[in-house]
Image (cartoon, rainbow, N blue to C red):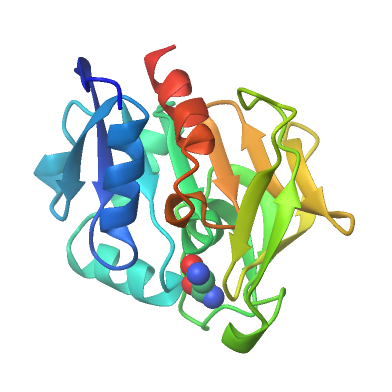
Amino acid sequence: MPDPSPDLTIGVLAVQGDVREHVAALGAAGAATRLVRRPAELDGLDGLVIPGGESTTIDRLCRIFGLHEPIRRLIAGGLPVYGSCAGMIQLAEEILDGHAEQQSFGGIDMTVRRNAFGRQVDSFEVDLEITGLSDPERPFVAVFIRAPWVERLGEDVEVLAAVDGHPVAVRQGPLLATSFHPEVTGDHRVHELFVKACSG
Ligand code: GLN
């Protein structure tokens, strides 16, 4: 495990979801981390991770805790942000099958459909080739849990991986999103890709 870089602090939005797993994966990828539950904890970050969990809950709590607008502003200002699963949903400009009042942070020019890959019982794993990862010959075991899929992509969005023609890893500038959960696999290459984006 590399020593955390003292120069690089990545926030992990810690209102709900698999926060601990992202903290561990980012640490293994060489970054120091900070849990974010209040607006002041966003100050001075080099990047932010929005974990998997339940996007409707993450959205509701972020608005209650006053995090919604500051995070939107940071995204607009170019902060690198990575969202996995529920985090992907929160980075989408448009959500289908969301709750009526659900709001995303936006940032990535795409439309995602919640739970499109199936319900909890339909969770699955698949070996993926993901553009930009180190050791590209080695497949990445991607775990999907009630995952969203992407139904529309803007032309500035790059597809890094797809399953049956559906994009499941996308990037737009400093924003990265995956429908799956790399934080639960012990393979830290997606987090390494994000840490690199935060230091660049
Ligand atoms: N279905 C969840 C949502 O809408 C996402 C599932 C996940 O993050 N594993 O937020």
Q: Is residue 103 above or below residue 155?
A: below
Q: Is residue 156 at least partly visible in the picture? A: yes
In this rendering, is residue 48 above or below 91? above
Q: How many marks?
A: 0
The quadrant holding residue 42 is top left
Q: Nearer the viewer, residue 112 or 136?
A: 136
**Residue found 57% across the figure and 78% down from its top:** 98
Residue 14 lies left or right of residue 52; in this view the side is left
On the image, the x and y values in percent for residue 157 come to 72, 36
Q: Nearer the viewer, residue 34 or 38?
A: 34
Left or right of 193 on screen, residue 126: right
Can residue 70 be seen by looking at this rendering? no
Is residue 54 shown left or right of residue 139? left
Measuring 28% from the left and 68% from the top, which residue is drawn there?
A: 16
Q: Residue at x 57, y 84 (%)?
A: 120
Front-most of 188 and 89? 188
